[in-house]
Amino acid sequence: MDNTNDIKILMESIGKKASLASKILSNTTDKEKNIALRNISSNIRQDINYILSENKKDLQKAAQNNKATSIIDRLTLNSEKIESIALSIDSISKLTDPVGKILSEWEQPNGLCIKRVTIPIGVIGIIYESRPNVTADAAALCLKSGNASILRGGSDSFYSCQAIYNSIRKGLSQSNLSEDSVQFVPTTDRNAVGYMLSGLNENIDVIVPRGGKSLVSRVREEARVPVFGHLEGICHVYIHKSADLKKAIAITLNSKMRRPSICGAAETLLIDKSIANKYLPQIIEALVNEGCEIRGDQDVQAIDNRVTDVSDLDWDTEYLDAIISVRIVNDENQAIDHIMLHGTGHTEAIVTEDKSVSAYFTERVDSSIVLINASTQFADGGEFGFGAEIGISTGRLHARGPIGVDQLTTFKYIVTGNGQLRP
C-alpha cells in the first residue's frame, strides 16, 4: 500500500470505531460520564511532567521554523495552564447532563402527547491548530454530551496533543468506557483532514474547525458534513459619545492586549467624533504603553503622531497580534455600518452609558456575541459558564457563539398515544 492508501485505511478505521462507540456512549448515564471526566482530569494532573516534556518538543520545532509569536503563545503550556485544563474538565463534569432534557411538550386535540427531547449528535470531528488545550476541552465536552469525538490537532502541537490524549485514553479505560469514545488522528498528513471532511463514509455527523483562515476556508470548501465554526474573528470595540472614559480605556486595552492572539481579541476600535479629541489620546497612550501598534487615517494620526497609516485591507484583517486599527465615526449608525461591512459575525462590544443606544446597537449588530460595557475577550465558553468550548460558531445553525455541551446535542420527538389512528 502507498501512503495515501495507508491514510485512507487508518481514517476509515477511526471513523468506524467512533461510530460504534457513539452508539454506546449515547446511552451512558451521566454518573458514568462524570466518573470518566474526573479520571481524565486526574490523569492529566498526574502526567504533567510528561505533557510538559512533549510540549517542549513542539516549542523547539516552532522556534526552529520561526513561527509567529501568536502561534507560540497558543502553543505554550506550563503548570498553571495544565491545571487550568484539568479544572476545566472538572467543571464540565459538574454541568447538568444536556441529554434527555425536555425542550417542549404539548398535547394535540386528538390526544397525542408530543415531547421534544435532547439527544447526542453522534460523532463530532474537531480539526484544530496550535492549541493543545482543545484536545482536552473538545474530548470532555463531547463526552459529557454523549458524543464520540475524532480529534485532529495541528502539526505545530502534535506532541502536546498526543500526550494529553494519552491521559484521556487512560481515564476512559479506568472508567469502563470505550477508549474509542475519543479518537486522536495519529498523523500530521494533511490528507487525514480531507478524509475527515468527506465524512469518513458517513461516520462523522458534524465538523468543528478551530484554527486560522486557511484551515476554516478549506473546511468550508471541502466539507461534506455540517460545520460549526467561524471564518475569522474580526472583533470591534465601539466607544459611544456617552461612554465613561475610564471604562473606555480599560475595555479597549483588555479587549486588544490581554491576549492579542485569540479570536476574541479586538482588531478595530471605533469611536465617536464628538469625543475623539478627548478620549483617543489617553486610549492610544494606554495601548502604546502595552506595546500595541496603532493604525489610523489622517484624523487619528493628527491626534497622536505615533499612529501609522491604515489601509482598506486593515479593516478586514484579523491581526492576532498587538496591532489595532482605529476609525473615528460620526455616530452609532456609522459604527454599525462599519461592523456590518467589515465584521465576521464573531464578537462586538459597545461602551456606552446610554441604555437606549446599547439596545439599538444590540438589536442591529448581528454577531454571535454582542457585549455592553465589557471586554470582547469574554467571548469564551468558560466565561459563559459552559466549562469550556470547542470553538465559536458564527453560522446560522442551532450552535451559535461558544459551542458547549448544549450546542452538541440535537433532539428527537417522542409521541405517546392511546390507540389513535390517522383518518
Image (cartoon, grey):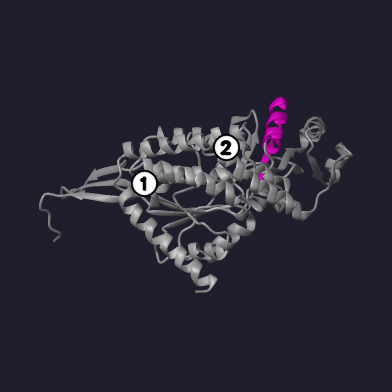
Describe residue 170's horizontal placement relative to residue 247 as left or right. left
Looking at the picture, which amino acid does disc 1 mark? Gly
Q: Is residue 191 above or below residue 345?
A: below
Upstream in the sequence, badge 2 or badge 1? 2
SS under mark 1:
loop
Image quadrant occupied by the C terminus: bottom left
Instruction: Tell me where residue 320 appears, x and y as whole percent.
Output: 69, 46
Q: Nearer the viewer, residue 136 or 124?
A: 136
Q: Is residue 49 above or below residue 132?
A: above
Describe residue 297's horizontal placement relative to residue 359 as left or right. right
Instruction: Tell me where residue 360 appears, x and y as whole percent.
Output: 58, 39
Q: Which residue is mark 1?
A: 146
Residue plotted at (35% across, 53% down) = 21
Q: Nearer the viewer, residue 284 or 78?
A: 78
Residue 222 shown in magenta? no
Residue 243 shown in magenta? yes
Q: Is residue 59 visible?
A: yes
Residue plotted at (73% across, 30% down) = 249
Q: Residues within 10 Å of mark 2 (few under 14, many from 20)?
A: few
Question: What range of the chain is rendered magenta?
Answer: 235-258
Q: Residues within 10 Å of mark 1 (few under 14, many from 20)?
A: many
Q: Which residue is mark 2?
A: 49
Residue plotted at (81% across, 45% down) = 296
SS under mark 2:
helix
Looking at the picture, which amino acid does disc 2 mark? Asn
